[in-house]
Image (spheres, grey):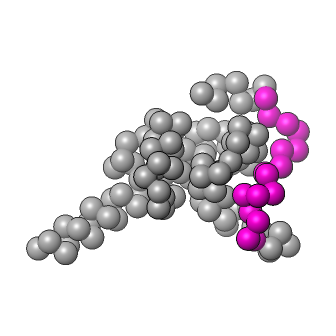
Amino acid sequence: MFQDWKRKIKDNPQLSPHLLWDIDKSKLDLDKMKTFIVQRVIERGDNEDFYAIFKLYGGPKGVREVVKKANFHNPRDEALARILFDLNKDDFECYKRKQLREKHLNC
């Protein structure tokens, strides 16, 4: 879907303000908060926001690795991430933790 991302990316891409409305911009650390930011883009972002995170985090392959660490609360967002980044359920760390938790509780 984003094969042409290098051609469409802007020199200084900005994330849409509505994505981080609840974050103090002066305390925003793009590196430490990358999983949170990528998750927000998947939940509420548009194409320009995807291009911005591609620029920030090393293209679709870099974002794909970040997505694996996200903790999706909405099955729709998880499904979108799986489709966009060609992932399986068991690629997500949150899914692995859930499986371990269920296995442990069902002893």
**Up-down: is 74 above or below 50?**
below
The N terminus lies in quadrant: top right
Left or right of 79, for residue 21: right
Most common secondary structure along the magenta stretch: loop
Left or right of 10, for residue 93: left
Residue for point 88% across, 39% down: 11
Residue for point 73% across, 45% down: 49
As for residue 27 lying within the magenta part, the answer is no
The C terminus lies in quadrant: bottom left
Name the quadrant containing residue 95. bottom left
Which x, y percent locates residue 4? 70, 24
**Up-down: is 104 above or below 69?**
below
* Start-end of magenta stretch: 8-23
Left or right of 42, for residue 77: left
Which x, y percent locates residue 18? 76, 58
Name the quadrant containing residue 55. top right
The one nearer the camera, 58 or 7, is 7
As drawn, which residue projects farthest toward the left? 107
The one nearer the camera, 41 or 18, is 18
**Up-down: is 73 above or below 83?**
below
Which x, y percent locates residue 82? 46, 41
As for residue 20 lying within the magenta part, the answer is yes
Q: How many callouts does the rendering have? A: 0
As drawn, which residue projects farthest toward the right? 11
Camera sees residue 66: yes
Which x, y percent locates residue 23? 75, 71
Residue for point 68% across, 47% down: 45
The one nearer the camera, 72 or 100, is 72
Camera sees residue 55: no
